[in-house]
Amino acid sequence: MEEMEHVKCLIIGSGPAGYTAAVYAARADMKPVLYQGLQPGGQLTITTDVENYPGYPDGVKGPDMMIDFQKQAERFGTDVRYGIVTAVDFSGDKHLVTVDNKKKLSADSVIISTGASAKWLGLESEQRLNGFGVSACAVCDGFFYKGQEVVIVGGGDTAAEEASYLSKLCTKVTMLVRSDTMRASKAMQHRVMNAANIEILWNTETVEVMGEKAVEGVKVRNRKSGEEHVIPASGFFVAIGHKPNTDIFKGQLDMDEVGYLKIKPGSTKTNIPGVFASGDAADKIYRQAVTAAGTGCMAALDAERYLADKGLH
Ligand code: NDP
């Protein structure tokens, strides 16, 4: 039988958190092995311009930035591999990981940076115009709609916060809420209701995002009256929640009801010694590339300390 590969530090995921963890782990001689997952480079590979990542004064394309991240991780010897971690077993001393339902590895330390995925409405037009006016991140893309009219879908804290953010840049923000109540906190509701240029359309659903090559408007339907009309807009923001990519850790790692991994405050420690969580998989509040990178760094430092304490490094 083939001998099981053993690694000192296994990193799961290839967004800013995973690659930053890799840079630190590789430079500390932890010989990290990184599995890239379903979407090599992570969520930034589906955005266009990134202008809020420090160090790029002229901005950078999301996919280009992730190539830079990967190169930097590889420069110090990170073993970056294609492959999806399909199962884990954290019940023993050595952490067992299965890749692509086949290959098995054991690891002294594991850094989880599997990220999160934005939820989408599931409309064909939404998918077709993704990156051409359709976005799931107002903080990332709002700037491109300065002085223009936009539509945002959702009634939670994210939607309210993003509507409020957009209202400072855009001439008009139309917020589509599918029922007659908003899930956002009272304070956030108050803020959007009191903004002069935010209009809330209750009981309203999206029928279609209009436009051939770029967003030109949004066709909506009132769910009570059935009436439809088109709202002119050049941006369409979807803010109906995110789903952390943590299904494979269910039953083994502590997580909240949505699946965000729980970590010991001020660290990246999960409930299992030697398993650390970084990036959006453990962050439902900030969700920025730079914060993900920051926690990736923390995870590598935490892992290094753990290995040293155990006499494994
Ligand atoms: P939520 O799950 O709280 O809200 C999702 C919103 O999207 C709801 O209004 C929901 O409507 C709506 N929605 C879901 N699916 C659809 C659909 N298919 N079509 C139209 N609307 C839809 O997600 P959030 O991302 O807003 O927040 C996630 C968590 O993070 C929450 O706990 C929130 O409090 C927290 N958060 C806190 C912040 C802060 O404290 N500053 C900032 C951002 C988030 P319905 O209610 O009808 O289901």
Image (cartoon, rainbow, N blue to C red):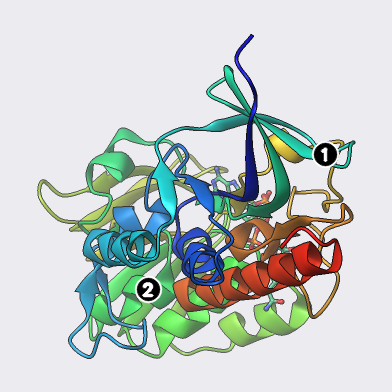
Residue denoted by label 2? 140
Residue denoted by label 1? 90
Tag 1: residue type?
A: Phe
Q: Quadrant of ligand 1?
A: bottom right
Which image quarter: residue 160?
bottom right
Q: Residue at x 45, y 53 (%)?
A: 14
Q: Quadrant of the C terminus?
A: bottom right
Q: Residue at x 27, y 66 (%)?
A: 68
- Whether label 1 touches label 2, CB < 8 Å: no
Which of these two is toward me, 155 or 256? Answer: 256
Mark carried by residue 6 = none
Label 2 residue near ligand 1, CB within 8 Å: no
Tag 2: residue type?
A: Cys
Q: Secondary structure at mark 1?
A: loop
Q: Quadrant of the N terminus?
A: top right
Q: Residue at x 51, y 82 (%)?
A: 164
Choose mark 1 or mark 2, whichever is in front. Answer: 1
Please say whether residue 150 is visible from this viewpoint: yes
